[in-house]
Amino acid sequence: MNRHRHARSEAGQVLVIVGLGMIAFIAMVGLVIDGGNAWGQQRETQNAADSAAKAGAVVIQRGLTGGTATCADVAAAADTTAGANGVELESAEFTTFDGSPMGVDVAMCGSIPANAQGVLATTTQDFDTFLMQVIGFNQLTASADATAVVGVVEDICPAEDGCGVLPVTFPRSLDSCDGTNSRIIGEDEWVLLNEENGDVLDSSNLAIMPLCKKAPGAVGWLDYGCGNLANHIENPCNDEIPIPAWLQTNPGNMNNVEDELNGFTGPTPGLAEDEDLIVRIPIHDNTCRTDVDGPDNDPLLYSTTCPDGDWSGNGNNIYYNIPYWAGFKLDGAFVGGSDPECNQAPGSPFAGGNGATGCLKGWFVAIYTAPGAIIIGPIPPGTSEPTGIVLVN
């Protein structure tokens, strides 16, 4: 009789141990699953904080540039943006030009403080757990903050400094028109070079950029609204080109602009000279038959997706998606037609292939992902300087 009781007692102990082991196992699995979910929620909360801070800073920007803006406007913009991203706006306060908090809640004032130039936004998001509920954690909270300030936009290269914005776009990955020797702009043999850091620009690292026309998304000549292609190069119109953006093609004849392009180059091929100027070239990664941008190129409506399908545009009157621009120190332009220089030294790789209609020779020296550098500094009310928004943390 006692023997049976002892057996039942041991069986009960085993069940307790197994039960505790299962709970521990589920808890560990829960840590993995819920940990991954928590990381994703944190990322979303951070993105929402970034957006809320920038939305508030846009209102301040409007006030600094002559428009009407109040604390209530800043608060509404930040709160609405946070809500649209599915998070709570825990707090929002004004900052100075360098992002230093001012201790003034955007929802607790009437007029925007005189030296307010940014917004510090904090967002939170509660989310349910999965398996961690077994150990009593039914809900977790993600929290994030971000600061956005208004700054003055400095031109990448003012026209008076002799720099050009070329009306031609190259694909990010460019081959030699015959489908071989593919190069990625800024990588491989076409690395970014910096003379200030000691890089020597000479014939050994001179790049040949072929003007291929063999397929959609090869090379396109663009219309910035400055007239014909020659005017675009010699007398570019005073206009801001957002980055990123979809830009439309120009039906002009590139064979007629070789002299204008060579106005940016020096006399000695393969040698980086003071006369070899840096030109700005838009780099594309997609084409589309229709314009993807919203009204007035509103950056909030910008999308990288073409409704007609990726790379659907071909021929004249198409749009190129430009995610960034390249700075190219121009050594020579050969676009007159039947240009043997594109298959000769100095420079590499040779253009090759029947699709080549010319080339540019030079060195990649920069990548630009915004229309200009944002200068963080005090901005007087009513400024006429171009301004922009930048995240400082």
Image (cartoon, grey):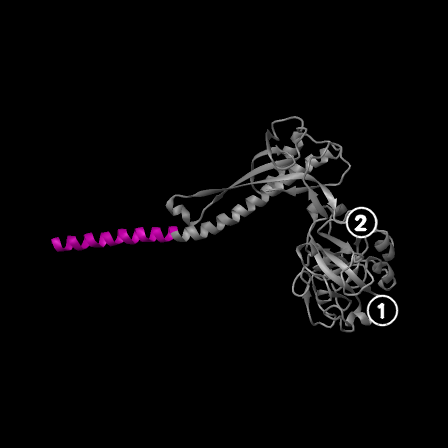
**Rendering quarter of residue 200:** bottom right
Q: Which of 305 and 391 lies nearest the eye of the viewer? A: 391
Cα distance between the residues tagged 2 and 1: 30 Å
Q: Which residue is mark 1?
A: 337
Q: Position of residue 218 (x, y in %)?
A: 74, 64
Please report the residue visible at 55 percent of the width from the left and 44 percent of the height from the top. 45
Does residue 74 sit above or below 20 in this rendering?
above
Which amino acid type is marked by label 2? Asp
Say if 230 sits above or below 59 in the image: below
Residue 19 highlighted magenta (yes or no): yes
Tell me the magenta residue range.
1-27
Bin the neighbour count of mark 1 within 10 Å (Cα to Cα): few under 14, some 14-19, many 20 and up: some
SS type, badge 1: loop
Residue 187, image x, y percentages? 65, 62
Residue topped by disc 2 = 161
- In the image, 131 versus 116, the foreground residue is 116
Report the magenta stretch's main SS.
helix
Residue 259, by quadrant, is: bottom right
Q: Which mark is residue 48?
A: none
Label 2, secondary structure: give it. Answer: helix
Q: Is residue 286 left or right of residue 393?
A: right
* Of residues 306 and 92, the one drawn nearer to the viewer in this rendering: 92
